[in-house]
Image (cartoon, rainbow, N blue to C red):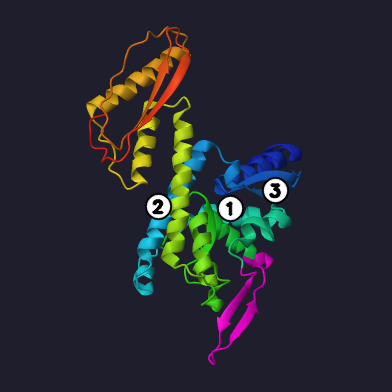
Amino acid sequence: MKAAQESLPPKLAQEMISDYDVETLDEAGGLLYSAYKSSPKKIGFKRNSFKDLGISDQIRVLKDNVDNYNSLINSINTPEQKLLNKLQQHNPNKEVYDDLVQILSTAVDSKTGIYGGPGQVGSPNRKYMIKNADGSNSIIKGKQFSRDEAIRNAAQFLTEPEIDRLLGTHVSFPQQGHVLDAKNNIDLARDPNNMRAQQAAPNWRDGADAKGLVNLSREDNLKIGRDNDVQQLLELIDERMGQEISGTETMNLLNMAKEIQGEQRFAASPEVKGILENLSANRDAQAAGAVVGEKPTVINAGEGSRVYVEGSNGNGSKAEKIKAILKNGNGNGKH
């Protein structure tokens, strides 16, 4: 960049640097944040909602939600120190980290990136109720991160790996969380070293436990969140299966649907591969304008299997979609 700035007209060089900064921040923001030019010399951040995502990304996020709910549920009775022993340290690429700090310090719009957006993720700018030694309660009101704190906080958050460093689960739509509970560790609430990216929805629901659940245990609360996301994910899988997708994606979605319901995955048998290859070949032929004759497809599916078959009429256009769902079985039949 520096060489480009010295060898090109100043205006063009500045545009190139600005474009590089936007692309760098946009990539670092993943699915959660999108970077954009808010002015000729400044870059803003837009926080994306789940509804902003395409269906494939929504499926990915919901699957990660389910996995993170399960991991949180399984960790409930694990002693804190044993859990902390699993923590992987935040170890970003130094060149990338330093590059982000430089961009955040010089080019990012303060409103959307420093005093809002990634600069304030996990900010202690909220009320905490702590119990005093005499049994009484005190309310402590935190303050948002200062500019310097916000820059370090944003750089830490944007360089977090796609794996939860404590739980080991995949994180695709993150929220800044604390390694040690901020409520019970007030002195660490502002320390980026006590921060880690967590999957947003499970972390948010789990936070309700710290606020005090009424007639609901932490485990029950997490199970409700997981079951809600399982149902939403199954609906999205059904929707995606009705679209023009490859045989490989079809198999992946079928296995995902079974996995999140605690069922055995489909075996990658030659019969299954053959059916999916035929479906893909027919779709490719249709896309090329070829005529695909009607031929009956026979599938023996065990009870509990979800089978999606796309039919076509004699001229190659899609005529119908048939979804057969056989319930109350173990899904171990031939399919």
- 82 sits left or right of 100 in the view: left
**Marks 2 and 1, how far apart in space?**
32 Å
List the residue tagged with mark 2: 67
Q: What stretch is highlighted in magenta?
A: 124-149
Q: How many residues crowd around disc 2 within 10 Å: few (fewer than 14), some, or many (20 or more)?
A: some
Instruction: Say if the magenta span includes residue 136.
Output: yes
List the residue tagged with mark 3: 43
Q: In which quarter of the image is residue 305?
A: top left
On screen, residue 310 above or below 101: above
Q: In which quarter of the image is the N terminus?
A: top right
Element under disc 1: helix
- 190 sits left or right of 301 in the view: right
Q: Pointers 2 and 1 in contact (CB under 8 A)?
A: no
On screen, residue 326 above or below 90: above
Expressed as whole percent of the image width and height from the top left, the position of residue 8 reads: 70, 37
Element under disc 3: strand
